[in-house]
């Protein structure tokens, strides 16, 4: 079997902090990250949602944490779309709305 080559990516939105724009970039990135290893959320960072995958990084500025606005709702939507299941999803959702900085290690358990 021939070895398949994958391109390593750094994909990001324009840094404006607009949730809908970040979600559009997220959807366009589907299939480009491979297995997902880490999720970082930090509401003090410009790119406040970072996804580390097997083939690169996805940096989003409009999906954040630590309050009840559209940014955290966008972050929860991403968790659902990458396949985080209950009961982890429920705990992660609570964290996203209440904590200003989060790190999740997924160990490649989801592929998106």
Image: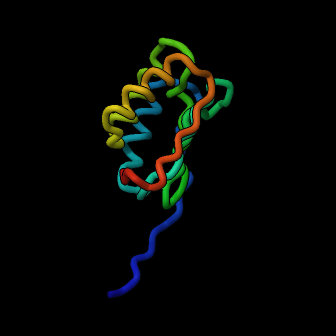
Q: Which residue corresponds to the image point at 33% horizontal and 34% vertical from the top-left? A: 80
Total number of numbered discs in the rendering: 0
Q: Is residue 28 above or below residue 65?
A: below
Q: Please state the horizontal and vertical placement of residue 106, each as a whole percent of the image.
A: 47, 48
Q: Is residue 11 above or below residue 76?
A: below
Residue found at the very far top of the displayed protein: 68
The residue nearer to you, when weighing 5 against 79, is 79
User: Does residue 20 appear in this view?
Assistant: no
Residue found at the very far bottom of the displayed protein: 1
The colour mode here is rainbow
The residue nearer to you, when weighing 93 against 53, is 93
Q: Which residue corresponds to the image point at 50% horizontal and 24% vertical from the top-left? A: 96
Q: Which residue corresponds to the image point at 50% horizontal and 61% vertical from the top-left? A: 55
Q: Please state the horizontal and vertical placement of residue 77, each as a whole percent of the image.
A: 36, 29
Query: In terms of image quadrants, where is residue 23?
Result: top left
Q: Is residue 74 above or below residue 56?
A: above
User: Does residue 53 appear in this view?
Assistant: yes
Query: In terms of image quadrants, where is residue 15?
Result: top right
Q: Is residue 32 above or below residue 27?
A: below
Residue found at the very far front of the displayed protein: 87
Residue found at the very far right of the displayed protein: 44
- Is 76 on the left-hand or right-hand side of 83? right
Q: Split into 4 quadrants, where in the image is the N terminus?
A: bottom left
Q: Please state the horizontal and vertical placement of residue 8, each as a whole percent of the image.
A: 53, 63
Q: Please state the horizontal and vertical placement of residue 39, each as a whole percent of the image.
A: 52, 41
- Is 2 on the left-hand or right-hand side of 22? left
Q: Which residue corresponds to the image point at 42% horizontal and 21% vertical from the top-left? A: 73
């Amino acid at each position: 079997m021939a070895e398949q080559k994958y391109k390593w990516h750094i994909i990001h939105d324009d840094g404006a902090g607009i949730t809908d724009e970040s979600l559009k970039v997220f959807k366009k990135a589907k299939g480009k990250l491979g297995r997902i290893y880490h999720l970082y959320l930090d509401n003090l960072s410009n790119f406040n949602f970072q996804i580390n995958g097997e083939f690169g990084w996805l940096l989003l500025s409009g999906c954040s944490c630590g309050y009840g606005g559209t940014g955290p709702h966008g972050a929860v939507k991403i968790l659902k779309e990458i396949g985080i299941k209950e009961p982890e999803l429920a705990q992660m959702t609570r964290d996203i709305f209440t904590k200003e900085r989060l790190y999740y290690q997924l160990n490649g358990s989801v592929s998106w």
